[in-house]
Image: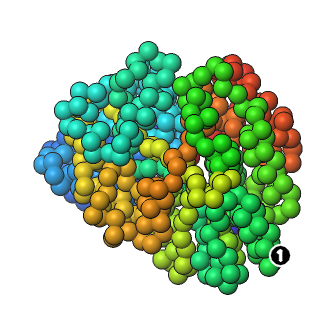
Amino acid sequence: MKRSLARAVRFCLAALTLTGGALAYPTVGGAARPPVGRENASMTSTVVRVWYGTDDPTEEALAQALARRFEATHSGVRVDLQSYALADLNGRMELALSAGTPPDIVYTTPRGPGLAAYVRAGQLTNLSPAWRQRGWATRLRPNVLVDYNRLLTANSGVAGHVYAVPYTMAAVGVLYNKTLFHKLSLRIPRTLAELDSINSRVKHAGLTPIGLGNADGWVGDDWWLTLVNARTGPTPLAPALRPDPHFSFRGAPFRDAAVTLQRWATVGYFTPSFNGLDAQDSMDAFFDGRTAMQLVSSTQNGQILALSRERKLSVGVFAFPSTHAGHPIMPQSGYAGWAIPRGSAHPALATAFIDQMLSPQTAALLLAHGLLPADTLGRDAHAAAAFQQDFLQALETATPGVYLDAAPIPTLNATMEATIQLLLAGHESPDVMLTQLQTTYASSGARATSTRTDGEF
């Protein structure tokens, strides 16, 4: 199988890690030299170091554009922005924090060994003063900043403080091939029963009902928790995020969702060999045009936008159907967050950088890249691609669902990804899967199944 672009990016990032993160410049007379002009800039500028975590290979250009914008508005400042895959970044951050040599700003995930772990270790700057003085909460969607940091600070003794600021939304929706839907006379499903009927009709037509790549675990995780939300609604699930010691994964909706996923895998509703494909691979396969639907996070929108333009495929997005018609569900929250390590050499500039990330100009760049800004968009939404407008409409009208894997229990995210991978591969039963999750949750992560997790959602 041809190696995906995402894997090639990760290979390059691994090479950077082996060389201490330094870019390899052309050599003259055996000595490495930076690009023309950079040697003088580095001697006269204040250098702000930014580490940017993403598993989307299309996001590198966006990150660099944001860095250049900050330089343009801050004379005498140069931004040295390095992008890393999320798993690589979190590993590097642990080493840098231990050595006292962190970047000035980091953009990374709240999941797994990410922002929440840095908060518990006391390694991040409290941004509450800046949050109040600069009005960051009012620039974002209602409650996004407060809810985001409530999870980061759970069980840490610093509840109420702000340590990280998201600037994009993570929201789960269903990407669908409009051409196939028209050809097969399908309509957007209003209930889970209608969704199951579509799967059967698409399979009977010799096509793939559901695109899936689950080698990195998080897409199967999103499928399961979204199916649970569709069966229960968010209210019974919210206690998991406190966390409430009485919350349990053993109820019928949790098992029904697992049974459904395993059945779909068994009857062949998913992309062939889905356990060997990562999320980027399966997105490529979807845009070959023979797949009807794919569960996606809005954090994948950059790749979706690029592929839809390249392949000329007409796509749309709808909110996930529930058990009752007219009540679609959409798990949603702030995505990765901007944070300032306590060892930042330039905390004032780092704060100004975050401030600019919450500006309308940045929101416009995010929208142009395909992402969903975490701010209140208003008049700029009309400039978005059609599928983005679908996403935005769903975000406004669907019931906000709960990301169960965001419960502040160490290793719960990794356990959920690992057990669902085993479930979909037929190596684990729904009952065993739920027992593993409950054991991890009830023990506050002391007893858990573990696997590599990139922290995406």
From this viewpoint, is residue 126 visible?
yes
Q: Residue furthest bottom?
A: 183
Q: Residue at x 41, y 31 (%)?
A: 149
Q: Nearer the viewer, residue 2 or 269?
A: 269
Query: Counting other residues with Cα less than 10 Å from the Cα at mark 1, is it few (<14), some (14-19), or many (20 or more)?
Result: few
- Please give the count of numbered marks on the rendered protein: 1
**Is residue 263 shown left or right of residue 70?**
right
x then y, percent, for residue 358: 28, 47
Q: Which residue is mark 1?
A: 204
Q: Residue furthest top?
A: 157
Q: Residue at x 58, y 55 (%)?
A: 328
x then y, percent, for residue 112: 57, 34
The image quadrant of residue 196 is bottom right
Q: Residue at x 64, y 63 (%)?
A: 190
From this viewpoint, is residue 282 visible?
no
Under circle 1, the secondary element is: helix
Q: Nearer the viewer, residue 401 or 52?
A: 401
Q: Would you place residue 4 above or below residue 350 in this image?
A: below
Q: Would you place residue 363 above or below residue 415 in this image?
A: below
x then y, percent, for residue 195: 71, 63
Q: Residue furthest left?
A: 75
Location of the N terminus by quadrant is bottom right
**Is residue 132 shown left or right of residue 371?**
left
x then y, percent, for residue 39: 23, 50
**Is residue 267 shown left or right of residue 16?**
right
For the residue marked with disc 1, what is the amino acid?
A: His
What kind of colouring is applied to the model shown? rainbow
Q: Residue at x 40, y 50 (%)?
A: 168
